[in-house]
Image (tube, helix red, strand yellow):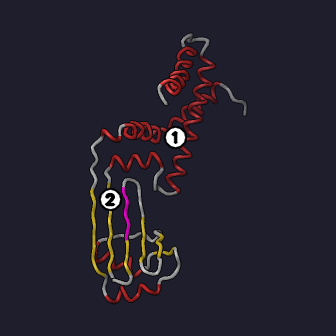
Amino acid sequence: MRFSFGTARQWHWISAAVSLAGMLLFAVTGITLNHASDIPASTTVRTVESKLTAEMTASLPTLSGEELVTPEALRQWLAQTHDIDVPTSAVGEFDGVELYVAWPGPGRDQWLAVDVEMGEFIFESTDRGWVAYFNDLHKGRHTGIVWIGFIDVIAIAIIVFTLSGLWLLLKQSSYKPSTWPVTALGLLVPVVIALVFIH
């Protein structure tokens, strides 16, 4: 299909509609990331240290392998007894003495260490608040493959939005003399800042 003024406008508004929410999110979190040290943190830490039941402790020495999924019986016991929800997808490491499992997420970190010989465990959860949550969404940190795919789609939509906008500028520049000076300014400002003010 021949690319024309009409199709450029269609690509422009469609890509704008697709990327609207994502572009707004990334613009706002870009500001919060730039000023992270100026925004008060609301970190909440929860720590649980306790002993396992004799039955649970007896079942753990059967673990094998350096990387393994947390045993279902242990997961259920932790959830029912201590309100600790270990995801089924969380892969742990076992060295013959200690089982260590970590399952970080956007804005939070969680880990569990179980001492098989002593029959004890320690769990810690750190929640860094909503600002950290959205900042991690911006970076794609511990968000999973679906969110990373979403970021890629938004990035492509923004590229289409930008290039179709440039095409529209090219078509309308003869009617608006200020088009290219303003466009050139938009290109030169970041270059000058990078060359002069970033060391």
The kind of residue on which mark 2 rests is Thr
Name the residue located 55 percent from the left edge and 14 percent from the top edge.
181
Pointers 2 and 1 in contact (C-beta within 8 Å): no
Q: The N terminus is located in which quarter?
A: top right
- Classify 185 as above or below 150: above
The kind of residue on which mark 1 rests is Val
Viewer-side residue, 44 vs 14 = 44
Where residue 13 appears, x then y in whole percent?
54, 32
Name the residue located 27 percent from the left edge and 77 percent from the top edge.
50
Viewer-side residue, 131 vs 35 = 35
- Classify 33 as above or below 145: above
Distance in Å between CA atoms under marks 2 and 1: 34 Å
- Classify 117 as above or below 29: below
Classify mark 2: residues with Cα within 10 Å, few (<14), some (14-19) or many (20+): some
- The residue segment tinted magenta is 108-112
Q: Locate residue 146 relative to residue 85 in the image: left or right.
A: right
Name the residue located 52 percent from the left edge and 22 percent from the top edge.
192
Image disc number at residue 18: 1
Image disc number at residue 43: none
Where residue 34 appears, x then y in whole percent?
39, 37
Viewer-side residue, 62 vs 9 = 62
Classify mark 1: residues with Cα within 10 Å, few (<14), some (14-19) or many (20+): some
Q: Locate residue 154 relative to residue 42 in the image: left or right.
A: right
Give the residue at mark 2: 126
